[in-house]
Image (cartoon, rainbow, N blue to C red):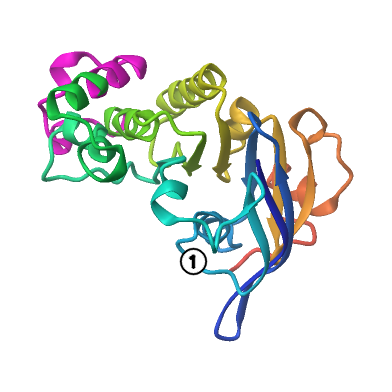
Amino acid sequence: MIELRDVHKSFGSKHVLAGVDLTIAKGESLVVIGGSGTGKSVLLKCILGLLRHDAGTITLEGEDVRTAERDAFLARFGMLFQGAALFDSLNVWQNVAFRLLRGSLKRPPAEAREIAIEKLRRVGLKPDVADLFPAELSGGMQKRVGLARAIAAEPDVIFFDEPTTGLDPIMAGVINDLIREIVVEMGATAMTITHDMSSVRAIADQVAMLHDGVIKWAGPVAKMDAAEDPYLHQFVTGSAEGPIEAVR
């Protein structure tokens, strides 16, 4: 579904991606792990074409992301942003239906509202939440609204950017379970970036570790704990000892 070959991205003298090779199969859930500042978000933005990579190729079902027609290309993606990133001036159903109220996916407002309420139900929120504003919701509810928005247009690919950031362990578990259920139910291809190992174990089919601008290890989540790669082992165990230097 998504293929990256020798992808590079620099900002001035800072080399963030230095030859990334990665493949995400259709219907697969891939989780990219790595420390803060290792380029996980940059990788995601390059796939979406929000950042233009300097070298290498990124394709979606064989189509180069740099030459794809933007509206049609982006219509295939859903996104759960870190911190939910809801529009505070719009009520909940308008947030969920944001893409359905404009552009190539535009629907009549009544139909868009109906779809939004159905997606809210899918993430465990009642219809009476639809007319509230984000400021009236808890952090966990805001994250659910963000998830409902990500799936509202029935995308082929869904990206999850640190989906459990700022949530308590119980709510994080609820969100992880919802993500897994919805991805399987929709048959969508999913890519998650996180450093939360509980999310990795709950969401992933495949895991890839990004460090020093390259993929240090990639494989099935079932083989992650037994893998001998020292970078992966140190990250998974949270050890201060190993090849990854802790910033002091």
Left or right of 94? Residue 216 is right
Residue 101 visible (yes or no)? yes
Q: Which residue is at the front of the view, 13 or 106?
A: 106
Look at the image and give the residue range highlighted in magenta.
116-140
Rendered-image quadrant of the C terminus: bottom right
In the depicted structure, whether residue 213 falls above or below residue 27: below
Q: Which residue is at the front of the view, 174 or 238?
A: 174
Q: Residue at x 89, y 44 (%)?
A: 228
Q: Residue furthest right?
A: 228
Q: Residue at x 22, y 31 (%)?
A: 107
Quadrant in the picture for residue 223? top right
Q: Amino acid at mark 1?
A: Leu
Q: Secondary structure at mark 1?
A: loop
Question: Label 1 belongs to which residue?
Answer: 51
State yes or no: residue 248 in magenta: no
In the depicted structure, whether residue 27 falls above or below residue 45: above
Rendered-image quadrant of the N terminus: top right
Quadrant in the picture for residue 31? top right
* Relative image position of residue 237 (x, y in whole percent): 72, 42
* Relative image position of residue 174 (x, y in whole percent): 44, 21
Left or right of 25? Residue 101 is left
**10 Å crowding of disc 1: few (<14), some (14-19), many (20+):** some
Q: Could you tell me what secondary structure mostly forms the magenta stretch?
A: helix
Q: Which residue is at the front of the view, 247 or 46?
A: 46
Q: Residue at x 57, y 35 (%)?
A: 190
* Relative image position of residue 206 (x, y in whole percent): 72, 35
Q: Residue at x 51, y 21 (%)?
A: 186
In the depicted structure, whether residue 29 falls above or below residue 194: above
